[in-house]
Each structure stands twice: as C-alpha cells, then as structure tokens.
Amino acid sequence: MALSNNVIGAINFVAMLLSIPVIGAGIWLATEPDNSCVKILQWPVIILGMLILKVALAGFVGGFWRIPWLLIFYLIAMLILIILLACLTVFIYMVTVRGSGHLAPSRAYLEYRLDDFSGWLRRRVHSSYKWDRIRGCLSSSNTCAELNQSYHMAQDFFNAHISPLQSGCCKPPTECGYTFVNPTYWISPINIAADMDCLKWNNDQNQLCYNCDSCKAGLLANLKREWRRADVILLITLIALICVYLIGCCAFRNAKTEDLFRRYKQGYT
C-alpha cells in the first residue's frame, strides 16, 4: 500500500509540473501588447492553470501522506478541470478557425478584413465602448513607431513582413492609393472611395488607422496567431494530463485492491 501511495504521489507531482505550461501560456499572452489591451483569454488560462496546480498538489499530499479523502477530491476535481481544459482548447480552435490575410498588389505584407473573422471575435471589438478602450491602449504602444525606425524607403517597407496589427493600424489600406512618405505618414490618395477606411486614415500619429475596421481586423489576426500558439501548448498539456490522470486512476484502484487484500488476510489470520 505504501508503494502504491508513493506512486500516486509521484504521478500527482507530474500533474503539478503539467500546470506550468498552462500558467506559462497565460502569462505569455498577458505580456503580448495586443492581448494585454483586449484582456480576453489570458486570465481564464492562468486561473485554470492555477487550479490544476492546486488540485494536483492536493493529490500529491493525499498520496504520500495516505489521506484517502484528498485522493478522492483529486480524482473528481481533476476530471472536472480536464473537461474544462478540453472545452477551452476546442473553443479557442473554433473561434480562430476563420480569418486570414489577403495579398495586396506589389506588397509582401498581408491585409485583413473584419468580416473574415468569427462573429464571437468580431463582437469583442465591435462596440464603440470596447474599441475606444482598446484603441487607446494600442495607440500608447510602440507598435507603429517601430516601423519608422526600421523602414525609411518605400520599397523596403513594401517588401517587409510586418505584423497583422501593424498592417491594419499603422498604414492606410493599399487600395486607397496613398503615397508613401514614411510607414506612418501617407499623402495624396488616388481612390478615397475604395473603402470607408480610406476616409478614416489620419496622419496624426495618435490617430493613424486606429479607427479603421482594418485595424480591428489586424488586431484579431494578431490574436488568432497568438491564441493558436497557446492552443497548441494547451492541447499537448491536455493529452499529457489525461494520460497522467488515467495512470493515477489505475494506481488508486490498485492501492484500494491491495488494501482490501491486506484487510482480508488480517481478518483470515
């Protein structure tokens, strides 16, 4: 029985370690400028990782110190958390399955349209109240200012692989026909009626295209890219956690069986 308890404790220690990638994914999302402005996914991921850590710790203590009720709590609570993690992983995949960039003539970077993304994501940036807060956060970052430091010639900028957020927020749409002065300063549009965003462009460095739908689309494209990376981490952790949980269930059952045989032998003798 003691050996089985030690095995259960060791298995739960592995479960504790598996909480680290989940917490780390949430912290990484929180440090990304766009995610820190939107504040949608990082806290659910961090909280779920912390819960996995606490429940695994309870199982670890219950296994090494032979506390049956803690082990039962671990089995029930961890099953619930595994289901929640699976739901979160599937949800992230579903809301990010749509939305991709479009090639612009003579440009290496892609441009983005808001209608290409899932309705759930669009609602996160649709209302003016939500977007005013997000826009203020984005405009206070160095996202666009970095372009001016990196690209001085028009052709260098056109050949650059800039981020979706920079493509959508820091420059006007290509179809408007603006003339390049620097990455965040454009003049003399040719086709101002090509897109409503053509009218929203402003050379004021605090305005730029932060009011444009292309900026919202670029933000969602950035979120999609980062959420997909986090989702891969969550998926791998989920698979490992399921394996650890099943091994723990088998070890717990074997421990109970050994205990029953031990009691039977004691009663028989």
Image (spheres, helix red, strand yellow):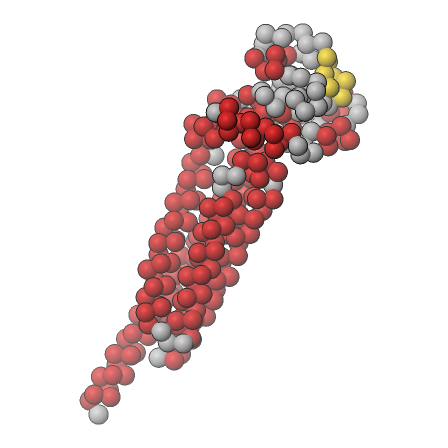
Quadrant where the image shows the C terminus: bottom left
Left or right, 110 with reference to 12: right
Q: Measuring 61% from the left and 13% from the top, which residue is drawn there?
A: 198
Left or right, 258 with reference to 240: left
Q: Measuring 41% from the left and 42% from the top, which residue is drawn there?
A: 90
253 or 121, which lies in front? 121
Vertical placement of 263 versus 149: above or below? below
Position of residue 99 measured from the top left corner of the image (x, y, whole percent): 50, 28
Position of residue 24 measured from the top left corner of the image (x, y, whole percent): 55, 52
Please say whether residue 116 is visible from this viewpoint: no
Quadrant where the image shows the N terminus: bottom left
Q: Residue furthest left?
A: 268
Q: Measuring 52% from the left and 52% from the top, which residue is drawn there?
A: 23
Position of residue 84 measured from the top left corner of the image (x, y, whole percent): 38, 49
Vertical placement of 119 versus 185: above or below? below
Position of residue 242 measured from the top left corner of the image (x, y, whole percent): 40, 57
Please say whether residue 87 is visible from this viewpoint: yes
Vertical placement of 109 versus 262: above or below? above
Left or right, 122 with reference to 84: right
Q: Measuring 48% from the left and 62% from the top, which residue is drawn there?
A: 16
Vertical placement of 260 versus 165: above or below? below
232 or 203, which lies in front? 203
Total residue callouts: 0
Q: Residue furthest right?
A: 152
